Amino acid sequence: MKERLEALRVEALQELHQVDNPQQLNDLRVKYLGKKGALTEILRGMGGLSAEERPIIGQVANDVRAAIEGVIDEKQNAFLAAETENRLRAETIDVTLPGKALPTGAVHPLNKVAQEIEDVFVGLGYSIAEGPEVETDYFNFEALNLPKNHPARDMQDSFYITEDILMRTHTSPVQVRTMQQMNGKPIKVICPGKVYRRDDDDATHSFMFNQIEGLVVGPNIRMSDLKGTLLQFVQQMFGQQAQIRLRPSFFPFTEPSAEVDVTCVQCGGHGCRMCKQTGWLEILGCGMVHPRVLEMGGYDPKEVSGFAFGMGVERIALLKYGIDDIRHFYTNDQRFLSQFARM
Ligand code: PHE
């Protein structure tokens, strides 16, 4: 029996030395040390041994088991170490390699400019009000002192949906909605949003564009307040050197009404091609809220007065960035848009 054990040791160790993967190693563990393994098989014959022989053979059996286990452990550790090394090697990164730049998005120039305009007015204490783009004839025209068949309706060719519903042609209907909501209390809001007109698209026109409206209503609001506010705005937008001038104009919802020019952003007022040698560029329309409009909004024109203004975001953006065609804003050319990511 001793010989058989010694032979087993030799055979097992020999086989174990040739093992080159964990699966094989496990197979051999089962083969030699498993419940039905070779060693167990031999030990089953221990019952037939004498009392003197038994401890001697037991000792040999233990030695053989220990030897086989020792080699198995050794092998096992070697496999584990190799596996770890392989994994670490696969995970190695070269931190000196240049990174891959991921393209990041940026705020659209129109949103950027609108945001800037809003910031200026919020800084002056204005709140922001919004209204629907699909508007009723009443809010878009009637309540702004533009009754049906009023010739001034032609100033803004409209997209009608039904006889009484249209795409709003300006942000002025939000004036009326705000007055109705504020119910006689003082108002100081700007209303940004998209507006729609039946215009043929060209370098300076678009069937859809963005406006920002302003409305202030309260006791003793005067034209000089309007002028001071607009000067503030223009200087924050275009620089401290910028000046404004008001030219008389007409809007049915304001009286008096004015068109506002800013010192030419290109030549600073000396005269150039951009300003057609006048030194001025038109940027917005404004005026004192018409008494009829105040009335229709639920305000008493004998108690309060107000001013309003409305500007096109595209126009401000064209001037601010020296862009020559409004269509650049809508055609989503990455080469155009990406320039604003860095501004
Ligand atoms: N709603 C006018 C327009 O779109 C602009 C404007 C607003 C003029 C407020 C005066 C007062 O042309």
Image (tube, rainbow, N blue to C red):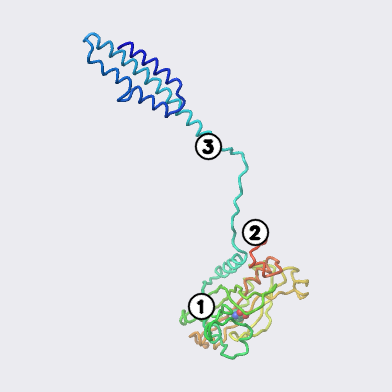
Q: Quadrant of the N terminus?
A: top left
Residue furthest out toward the bottom: 149
Secondary structure found at label 2 = helix
Within 8 Å of ligand 1, the CB of disc 1?
no
Quadrant where ligand 1 appears:
bottom right
Residue 84 visible: yes
- The answer to which of 342 and 333 lies nearer the viewer is 333
- Residue 200 vertical position relative to residue 143 in the rendered view, above or below: above
Q: Which residue position holds label 3?
A: 91
Residue identifier under label 2: 338
Foreground mark, 1 or 2, reads 2
* Mark 1 → mark 2, Cα distance in angstroms: 38 Å
Residue 223 in sight: no
Query: Label 3, label 2: how many angstroms apart (C-alpha)?
Result: 36 Å
- Looking at marks 3 and 1 on the same chain, the residue that comes earlier in the sequence is marked by 3
Q: Quadrant of the C terminus?
A: bottom right
Nearest the viewer among 276 and 242 is 276
Q: Tell me the residue at 74%/69% (across/down).
A: 268
Q: Which image quadrant for residue 239?
A: bottom right
Q: Left or right: 251 with respect to 8?
A: right
Residue matched to label 1: 187
Q: Earlier in the sequence, mark 3 or mark 2?
A: 3
